[in-house]
Image: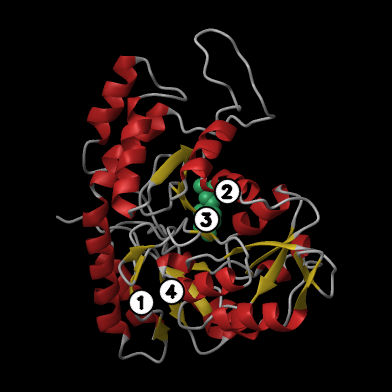
Amino acid sequence: MFETIFELINNQFPQDGIPLHEPRFGGNEQTYLAECVESTMVSSVGAFVDRFEEAVASYTGSKYAIAVVNGTQALFVALKLAGVGPGTEVLTQSLTFVATANAISYCGATPHFLDVDVETLGLSPAALEDFLANQTEIRDGQRINRTSGRPLSACLPMHTCGHPCRIAELAEICHTYELPLIEDAAESLGSTYQGQHTGTFGLFGTLSFNGNKIITTGGGGMILTNNAELAAATRHLTTTAKQAHRYEFIHDQIGYNFRMPNINAALGLAQIEQLPAFVREKRQLATDYRQTLATLPLTLVDEPADCQSNFWLNTLLFDNPEQKISFLEQANRRGIFARSLWRPMHLLEIYRDCPHGDLPITEDIYQRAVNIPSSVRVTP
Ligand SMILES: *Cc1c(COP(=O)(O)O)cnc(C)c1O
C-alpha cells in the first residue's frame, strides 16, 4: 500500500526531496519587492501594507484587516483585546499547533482543552456545549469553571489543516453563554463555511503568512475584525500605542512593535493576487490524491459538509498507530517529507497540567494521522 502512495506523491511532485509545503512565487513578487526597495520604505509603514490589508479584507469579506509580524502575535493581540486576562481560562482544542495555546499563555491565561470532531478535526460544538452546560456556573456576573474556580474569558477554535470547523454552531453557543469567540484561521485562508470566510465569525479572526502557509510574506500575520473600535484599538496597540502627532512621541499604553514591515507586505500583495489560483490548484491536488487513494484501506480527510476547504494540507488517517509510524519512517527516508499531526497540547509536558476532559477523538486522530506533501504544484 505504501508503494502506491509514494508513487502517487512522486508523480505530483517530480523533484528530489519533497517538502510538506513550500511557497510558489509566480506573480508580481520581484516587481513589488524591487519597487519597495527603490522607495526606501521597507519598514513598519508604507503603501504596500495598506494595499495588502485592503486585499485581505476584500478577499475575506472582513470589514477590517490589520497586518502584523506573525500569526502567533496576531492571536496574542486579538485575545488581549477580547479581554483575555491573567487568571482566566480560554476554551480551545488540544489538536492544534502550539502557537494557539502559547498565545493564551502570553495573556497570563490558562488553556482549557476540549475535544474535536472527527469530520472537521476542529473544536466540537457538542464538547463545548456539554462543558459549558454541565461544568460552569455564573458567579458575580462571571461564567466560572466550577472545578478550577477560574473565570472563562474566551473560546478559540482552530480550522485544522484548512478545513473549516462547525463555526456557525460554535458562534451560536458562544453567543448563548456570552463568551467572546476568536478564530485561529492561520491555516484556512481561502476556506469558507456556508460561503462565509473563516476568521469572520467571531470578535476577531487571525491569519498567518509564515513560509509554510497557503500564501507567505516571509513572516507575517493578520488580525480580522468587523468592529471599528476594536480595529482602531488593534492598530494602536500594535504600533507602540503612539498617539498621532507631527513631531512628538507620546505613548498612552505599554504597546507593542508588532506591525508588518512594508517589504513583507509587498511580497504578500503579490501572493494574494495568486490566491484564487492557489486554492483552485490545491483543491485539484486533493481530488487527484483522492482518486488513487480511494482504493486503499485508509481515509483521506475530506472537506466537511457545507464548506469549501483550501486543503492547506492533505491528511491521511491510517487504521492504526503502527502504520502511521512505519509510513513516516519510510517516506522521510525516501525524501518525501511527510509529517505527523501536532502532538496534542494536553500530551505536551508544558501543557499537561492544564484542565481538560477526556479527549478520545483528539488522541485517536493524532495516533493515526499523517500529513503528505501539499504544495501548489508547478504546472509545466
Ligand atoms: C502557523 C500557525 C500559527 C502561527 O503563525 P506564525 O505566523 O507561524 O506565528 C498559529 N496557529 C496555527 C494553527 C498555525 O498553523
- Distance (Cα) linking label 1 and label 3: 25 Å
State how far apart marks 2 and 1 are (Cα): 27 Å
Q: Answer yes or no: is residue 272 visible.
A: yes
The image quarter in which residue 150 lies: bottom right
Front label number (4 vs 3): 3
Which is more toward the observer, 228 or 277?
Answer: 228
Nearest the eye: 325 or 191: 191
Color encoding of the figure: secondary structure
Task: Say which residue appears at 27% left-offset and 39% top-offset.
Answer: 270
Q: Which mark is residue 203?
A: 3
Q: Is residue 378 above or below residue 26?
A: below
Q: Earlier in the sequence, mark 1 or mark 3?
A: 3
Q: Which mark is residue 377?
A: none
Say what secondary structure mark 3 lies in: loop
Q: Amino acid at mark 3?
A: Leu
In primary-sequence order, the first of circles 2 and 1 is 2
Q: What is the C-alpha distance between the residues marked 1 and 4?
A: 11 Å
Secondary structure of the residue carrying tag 2 is helix
Q: Which mark is residue 315?
A: 4
